[in-house]
Amino acid sequence: MSTGTTLTSWGAIRLVAGREIMTRLHSRSFVWLTVILVAAVVLGGVVLNAASSSGPTAERVGVTPQTAALAEPITATGSTLGTEVETVDVADDAAGEAQVRDGDLAALVTGTADDPTVVVDTELSPGLTAVFTTLAQQTALSDAVADLGGDPAQVAGDIATAEPTVRTIGEPSEFDPARYITGLVTGILLFMAIMISGQLIAQGVVEEKTSRVVELLLSTVRPWQLMAGKVLGIGLVGLGQVALVVVAGVGTALGLGLVDTSTIDLGTAAVWALVWFVVGFVSYALLMAGLGALVSRQEDVGAVTTPVTFLMVVPYIVGVSVAPWAPDNPLVVWLSYVPLCSPLLMPVRIALGSAETWEALLALGLSVAVVPVLVWLAAKIYSNAVLRTGARVRLKDALRAA
Amino acid sequence: MATLEIDSLTKSYGDVRALRGTSFDVRAGEIFGFVGSNGAGKTTTMRIVLGVLAEDAGEVRWDGRPIDLAARRRIGYMPEERGLYPRMKVGEQLVYLARLHGLSAADAKDAMERWTATLGVDARRGDEVQKLSLGNQQRVQLAAALTHDPELLVLDEPFSGLDPVAVDVMSGVLRDRADAGVPVVFSSHQLDLVERLCDRVGIIKDGAMVEVGTIDELRRTEHERWVVDGPPGATWIGAVPDARAVSLEGSRTVVELTSAGGVDGTSGREQAVLRAALAAGPVHEFALVRPSLTELYRDVVSAEEKPAGEAAETVEVGA
């Protein structure tokens, strides 16, 4: 006959994977999902940036020529108390009061430097209240010191350098918003990516079963080759999708200067996130492929994959709700070593900076070690169930059948 | 070209015995018609040939050796349950399936173009399969079975759902492939079509072959039957020794020669029938009656329901 018929296993897997990739890339819903995910990460970064830079702005306080001498002490006291104060010179009381009324100034200091009066529109902000109170107290203290024959400047200097002796007996709190957000985003992203890819696998398996094309396929390729090709193809597409989102996220964070690169290693967190996506995807994809083969209708995919979905939700919830606040919580730590939970928890711990490298490698080793078992299990269920159309095949039967 | 041998296959689904020692072979260059009632075991047999199902016992041989995946890749298969990706384009799909059978990308594309043109669906290459009519989907399905230039064709009910023109196209393609030396086996319930198209026929019943042979072999009856169009049979049948009337309908009489003897009118004993009829009046037609495949099939398939011997009374005079 005309052509060579040597199709190796790898050749068959590549063909199947190639078809899966082309199908996803041609799918409008898939392309839109990716665009939306990338946009969400970038927009999230921009919003976060806007929120953090619009934080406490300087309080504008007006001083008249008579009270201009107080400008420097006000600013200095403000910075001691953590209230940023910007002093503005105004021509006279009337002009200053007009600006206070307009809201241009938070307060106006009138009167004289020795006996100032603070003019506000309705009330003084808590920050400025503290500043002016402290200032008044210092004035009173200086007056008293002078009355007693002391040197107010000397006393002021002593007070300024006095500080309590502090001894720390607990662990220093390491709550870092950047880390928290990185951990949270990693957890959510991995969960979504693995979940979506897993569903695609199950739907793909059922599509072939529903359309009966699987019988034609299985007359030329072995079941495990078909399954492997499907997992590889959808996995590569999913990896590309996650990589895009991660790169967009890291790029946004670095570009906007959202994170302090000295306290958090985004590059490492990103690489680990991709590694864990691969491990998590392969593990769950195999389970999804096996379970998907049990049913013949798309409507039943959800029901049959529920146990696996539940298996994913538990570490996910722990990862995003417990881990960021308490990275060393025993539940978090122990679950992060359990295969099938690791891919959703360990990258969160890594992003939070709470996992040592050896811990990550150990969890990775355990997860990878379980993959051959999952391959065997999924291949058995898949081969036994994929040609049995009609009613849902019971898992027990699929495992038992020869 | 090689022979496909199906040897003593058995298969059970739970308590249901689908196949009990099914055996037949399909030789190079012949079209083999595989007939039987629903559930008799046709699809199960074909699925085992393709390796989609595993047999409990028995063997399928190709070219004298047990059939393996490499040999199965050279089969053109049309499953009973039609199967194509509904949302994949006709052209892409055929190329993909051809490549799974081992063709290079370029060869697969050539074959796709050739077969879509031959089967008259070349205008639909860019359309998704689900947008095609059922008849056209069927043509695409056949194209999928042919693009890799198979060495054996196994088609499960390839004619069901086809319009007469498509039936002619399909028949032509099968004849053409068989003439090129490819063994072709197909199942069908359209027995007139099987009779017209097939070189050999196998009838399966309850998982075992009850008849296998050429159409002529199958149509040969144990006792010769002759139809006489002339004087009513009742008036002259008594004068013929070793003969009985199978049916008496006005001027048409079907006579069966009950004694053992030659077949196909070689014994000369039918002349006694003709003489007796002529003695009673003018005879307008005198011919050997051969049951059609449909009649044979009914006989075979209903044999169990009827006590032996009575089956003959259901036979009608064929055209």
Image (tube, grey):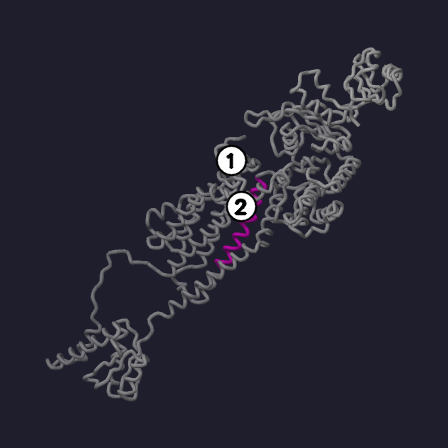
Q: In which quadrant will I find the C terminus of chain A?
A: top right
Residue A402 is one of the magenta-drawn residues: no
- Answer with left or right where residue B173 lies relative to residue A145: right
How far across and how far down the image is residue B68, in percent?
Answer: 66, 33
Residue drawn at (48%, 47%), measured in percent from left and top? A279
Q: Which residue is mark 1?
A: A393
Identity of the residue drawn at 24% across and 88% down: A66
In the picture provided, is A379 more to the left or to the right than B108? left
Q: Determine contact: label 1, label 2, CB under 8 Å.
A: no
Q: Identify the chain of the residue marked 2, using the numbered disc in the image.
A: A
Q: Nearer the viewer, residue A231 or B178?
A: B178
Please state if A56 lies on the left or on the right of B63 as rendered: left
Viewer can see residue B102: no
- For residue B35, above or below residue B119: above
The CA distance from mark 1 to mark 2 is: 16 Å
SS assignment for the magenta stretch, majority: helix
- The residue that mark 2 highlights is A203
Please provide percent x and percent y for residue B30: 77, 32
The boundaries of the magenta stretch are A224-247
Splitting the image into 4 quarters, where does residue A28 fall? Answer: bottom right
